[in-house]
Amino acid sequence: MHLVLNVIVDKQPREACKQATRRLSDCPKDEYERLNTSLEGLILTCLLVINVAGLVVMYVDKRMARLAVSRIPERWILSICLLGGTLGVILGMFVFHHKNKKRNFQLGVLTVVAFHVTILVSLVLNH
């Protein structure tokens, strides 16, 4: 984004269009590394936030179970897993001893883990 704004501000409109639409691999090495590093940081930050959210959701659901009030649906917790919060949810299962005996829930979490591993392996192999 920063690269595109600099090009548009500094160059003539026609040249700006050519430069703004160039591929990332055509960027200068230092600009490519800066963009790549900021993207990795953003992804890691999002994963950290979603995993903390998964841990908090497991705590809140355990607390609600003890108080015998309305609970968080399992599909919401599995959705958090699917979005990348699997580690937080699994950590919450062990730390708070929550949903350890629910085989369907465990199967759902394992399915999400298998899905994530498949994606990671395919990304590594195709890179």
Image (cartoon, rainbow, N blue to C red):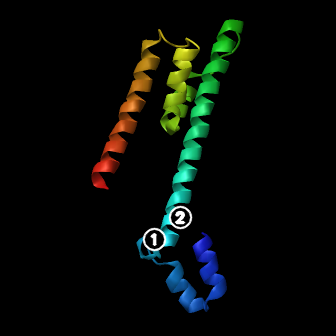
Mark sitting on residue 46: none
Q: Is residue 61 above or below residue 126?
A: above
Q: Residue furthest left?
A: 125
> In screen coordinates, is 42 left or right of 100?
right
Q: Badge 2, how many Cα within 10 Å: few under 14, some, many 20+?
A: some
* Residue 95 at least partly seen: yes
| For the residues bearing labels 1 and 2, Cβ distance under 8 angstroms | yes
Q: Position of residue 83 (x, y in %)?
A: 52, 38
- State the residue at coordinates (44%, 25%): 109
In the image, residue 118 sits, relative to residue 9, either above or below, namely above
Q: Is residue 75 visible?
A: no
- Circle nearer the viewer, 1 or 2: 2
Q: Which residue is mark 1?
A: 24
Residue lying at 45% horizontally and 72% vertically, measured from the top left: 29
Horizontally, is 108 left or right of 58 in the view? left
Q: Check disc 1 and give the amino acid type.
A: Leu
The residue that disc 2 covers is 35
Residue 77 horizontal/vertical position (percent): 56, 27
